[in-house]
Image: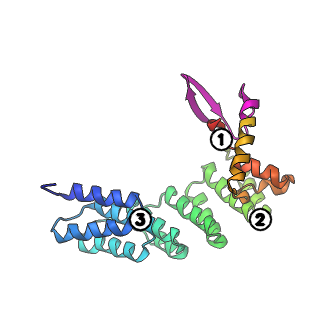
Amino acid sequence: MPSKNVVSWTSLIVGYGKHGLGWEALKAFDEMERKGIVPNKTTLLGTLYACSHAGLVQKGWVNFNTMVHKYSITPVMEHYTCMVDLLARAGHLTEAYNFVEGMPITLEAKLLTALFSSCCSHMNVELAKTVGQRLIELEPEEAGAYMLLSNFFGIIGDLEDVANVRKLMSKREIRKTKTFTWIEIDRKVHSFESGDGSHPLNKEIYNYLRNLVKKMKNSGYVPNTTQAWLCKMWMITQRKKWFLVVVRNWPLLLA
């Protein structure tokens, strides 16, 4: 390009980041600075995103501080979310939580939800409980927050706290909205819900799925059946548990 500006450099940095090329993104950012082009908030968001997806924690902190102290750019929620994602992905959960607590802007549920998911992935039970409770306090009328915490308690086998969360939902009259998935085929809309058996081709769909599950197992795929924690209560066999986890809306749509 005969002329490179902040837009072209930012596009390059974001492109590297989206493909997991964190070091390449940072090298492009360094070259941009050497050429005297001043980055904007989108540029810095791209570098943080790149650091997050490449696990470059220290580089992420450097870029965040560069944004604030060198370029006097005030971080917005997207920047904070990238930093929390960076720390949480790397397993620095306590550091991520302390970062959230120190943010000077209004906390959003999507940020806490991301942190909560990372706590679950890393099985940090105590912090997951803390973040889950904060999420409920932040969105006391949203069923999703309660269900996230309830499901986590189920995964770790704490059925007493599962019951406590459900009782709290009942006391506050919180109802989980039934969700559906839609797909259009030949200008006709088909809708499904989890475990749906109402479709006219239900038998054919599930026969297809059973064959698909066999192929997946033969290929070595092993699902995370800890997510099907309710099976412990229903005494469902491991074979049926496997099918329960795999056969959700997305295989119905594949069929």
**According to the image, label 2 marks what residue?**
158
Numbered badge on residue 80: 3
**Which label sits in the foreground, 1 or 2?**
1
Q: Which residues are magenta?
A: 179-205
Among the 4 quarters of the image, the one containing residue 138: bottom right
Q: Is residue 198 magenta?
A: yes
Answer yes or no: do the residues labelled 3 and 1 have beta carbons within 8 Å? no
Could you give the CA–CA distance between mark 1 and mark 2, rounded to whole angstroms? 30 Å
**Residue at position x 19%, y 65% from top?**
38
What is the residue that sits farthest to the right in this orientation? 235
- In depth, the one of 11 and 41 nearer the eye is 11
Amino acid type of the residue that numbered disc 2 sits on in the rendered structure: Asp
CA neighbours of label 3 inside 10 A, class few (<14), some (14 to 19), many (20+): many
Which percent across, then down, holds residue 215?
A: 70, 47
Tell how many labels. Answer: 3
Tell me which label, 1 or 2, sits earlier in the chain: 2
In the depicted structure, whether residue 109 falls above or below residue 38: above
Residue 11 in sight from this viewpoint: yes
Image quadrant in which the N terminus is located: bottom left
Residue 214: horizontal and vertical position, in percent? 74, 47
Image point 76% across, 48% down: which residue? 243
Is residue 139 one of those drawn in magenta? no
Q: At which x and y percent is residue 65?
A: 32, 74
Amino acid carrying label 1: it is: Pro
> What secondary structure is found at the residue carrying circle 3?
helix
Residue 44 left/right relative to 78: left
| Residue highlighted by disc 1 | 251
